[in-house]
Image (cartoon, helix red, strand yellow):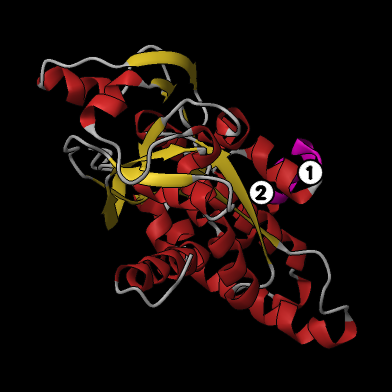
Amino acid sequence: MIDEKGVDLNLLKVFQALASELNATRAAARLGVSQAAVSASLKRLRLLYGDPLFRRTQRGLQATPRAILLQPAISEALRIVGETLEPAQNARSQPTHLFRIGLSDDFEMAFGAEILRLVREQLPRTRLIFRQTNAAMAAAALHDREFDLALVSGSLGDARIRHQSLGSSDYRIVFDPATRAGQGAFTLQEFLDCDHLLVSFSGITGITDDVLAEHGLKRTVGAATTHFAGLPFLLRGSPHLATIPSHAADALCRLGIFESSPCPVAFPRYAFGLNWHFEGSRRADLLAMRDLISTMFKKLQVGTLLL
């Protein structure tokens, strides 16, 4: 039988960090202690619970069935203890939990500020970290615990990754109206005559080129960037056009500098959603963040939330 009078609550914090990170080095960095201290605490935890709790594998630590069962109970216990201490502490003290979301910068531009606002309201002791990723990299990063949730396009096609669909997007043209003589939507000929600013990982070709090629057409790309976040600085005062996901186009237009136009050729819509490692399905904090984000997108779809 465990003698709760002799239990060091700091051991439970170590357990929580190891369960979240599944990596002793990252757990130590998260707690602000040495890796040796984490290893020593793990030895004490194993004696306390009579179970290995975490086994080493080629991909890092793997939680045992006992550890998986313990994780939600320990997280809830630490939350309750934390609430009892709040009256004696500054209510606006530094957040106690780091949560990492992987996403591309078009999603960060379009939805990041609203996610931050909702987290401040609903999960106030959480510090968010946005980390850049894409659909090609997200599955490996989730396995390696580089982030907790991934907001990317498409499905990752990995049986160990859980997926929740959030919606779909299409494409629009963004431009600086101060440099455009014409009015209204772009015609196909005007679109082809303009210089384009390409946003793609390769910097060579993108979805717009693929769509035009299906019609035997080609555009002129004057410059390219790998990041959507650079567009406000590259497009302002420039005659270039950027054909980008509509949610990113809306985010740029909210700055009050740019305008957008429908594309003169039909683009396929693409789906996007949240992804997480299956072992995270038992984590109360991950499920809370997942539900917060999915509820936000449901409101977007019915038009009750203006972003």
Left or right: 48, with 283 as reference point: right
Left or right: 165, with 173 as reference point: left
Closer-to-camera residue (73/157): 157
The crowding category of the residue bearing disc 1, from other C-alpha atoms within 10 Å (few below 14, some 14 to 19, many at least 20), is few
* Residue 45 horizontal/vertical position (percent): 64, 56
Q: Which residues are magenta?
A: 33-42
Mark 1 and mark 2 lie on one chain; the one further toward the N terminus is: 1
Which residue corresponds to mark 1?
Answer: 37
Closer-to-camera residue (5/201): 201
* Residue 284 horizontal/vertical position (percent): 48, 68
Does the rendering let one see residue 272? yes
In the rendered image, which quarter is residue 270 located in?
Answer: top left
Closer-to-camera residue (292/60): 292
Quadrant for the N terminus in the image? bottom right
Residue at point 60%, 34% (across, down)? 236
Q: What SS does tag 2 mark?
A: helix
Closer-to-camera residue (305/41): 305
Judge whether residue 184 is colored magenta. no
- Could you tell me what secondary structure mostly forms the magenta stretch? helix
Residue at point 30%, 68% (across, down)? 301
Residue, far front: 181
Which residue corresponds to mark 2?
Answer: 42
**Image height of 125 relative to 201, above or below:** below
Residue at point 23%, 14% (across, down)? 218
Residue at point 58%, 53% (across, down)? 256
* Residue 153 horizontal/vertical position (percent): 32, 42
The crowding category of the residue bearing disc 2, from other C-alpha atoms within 10 Å (few below 14, some 14 to 19, many at least 20), is many
Instruction: Name the amino acid type tagged 1.
Output: Ala
Does the rendering let one see residue 151? no
Q: What SS does tag 1 mark?
A: helix
Q: Are marks 1 and 2 in contact (CB under 8 Å)?
A: no
* Residue 228 horizontal/vertical position (percent): 51, 34
